[in-house]
Amino acid sequence: MCNLYSLRKGPAAILDLARAMRSDVGNLEPRDLYPDYAAPIVRMDDTGERILTTARWGLPSSKKALFDAATRRADKLRARGKDVDFPRLLELEPDSGTTNVRNTASSHWKPWLSPANRCLVPFTAFSEPGRDAQDKYRPVWFRLAGDDPEPLAFFAGVHVRDHSCVRKIKTGPETCDLYAFLTTEPNAEVGAVHPKAMPVILTTEEERETWMRADWAEARALQRPLIDGALVEASGER
């Protein structure tokens, strides 16, 4: 599961490569990006033009996941002798979001797989969880192979606008624009570190156009790993 990536290219480079018409992100400082924080995405606006804007990383979790989480919380409260208003508890159950979309056959994701909900998520490197010689966690970074030490590319993203939710208990209900990106089985480079998954990466204009415009029957073919050799480790280059 990819829960950390970096972006070290500015708006002009993103607009050009994504063929977006305008931006509302201002200047973009080079930074690492984490779940539930705002990050740049390229999506269609209400006029049908592509816009570089921001959304929070983490799509809505399934109703079952939220129900199960609220049930566990209710059980703990009851064990402490507390009265529980379960419908209200469920209504306020915090959902920090689902960062990666893998099972696109799930009924939970199907409403958001049309072109209207697709986006491009710009990045220059992404990390997967690895281990050092002492078996301690360390992120292993990957970038596209090539001469550019910080090449710009895009994840195949999905976004939802104006979603009403509770992300944190202390914040309470709020309305958010949200996004996540697809994952798939890993190629050789990522699989050596993280054998479960890698992000779906779009590297050509044709792939980006297909993702943003094609119906799902065609676009779903993009949910596949990059060819072996397409990535290199970038741990010391960020």
Image: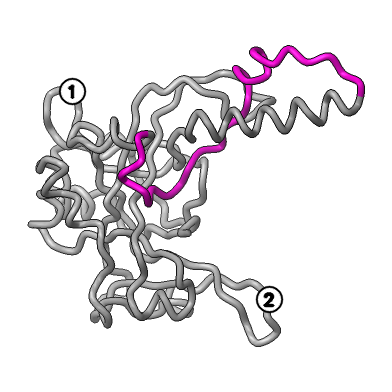
Identify the residue at horizontal 38%, vertical 66% (top origin). Answer: 125
Displayed quadrant of residue 45: top left
Name the spot of residue 232 as percent of width and height, x first: 35, 80
Displayed quadrant of residue 95: top right
Q: Relative to residue 165, is residue 44 drawn left or right?
A: left
Secondary-structure class at tag 2? loop
Q: Amino acid at mark 2?
A: Lys
Labelled disc at residue 46: 1
Callout count: 2
- Relative to residue 209, is residue 62 depicted above or below? above
The residue stretch that appears in magenta = 81-107
CA gap between label 1 and label 2 equals 47 Å
Labelled disc at residue 136: 2
Q: Relative to residue 202, is residue 176 drawn left or right?
A: right
Secondary structure mostly seen in magenta is loop
Identify the residue at horizontal 68%, vertical 18% (top origin). Answer: 89
Tell me which label, 1 or 2, sits earlier in the chain. 1
Displayed quadrant of residue 65: top right
Name the spot of residue 74 as percent of width and height, x first: 75, 25
Q: Amino acid at mark 1?
A: Asp
- Does 210 lie within the magenta span? no
Identify the residue at horizontal 51%, vertical 23% (top origin). Answer: 165
Q: What colour scheme does the image use? A: one colour
| CA neighbours of label 1 inside 10 A, class few (<14), some (14 to 19), many (20+) | few
Secondary-structure class at tag 1? loop
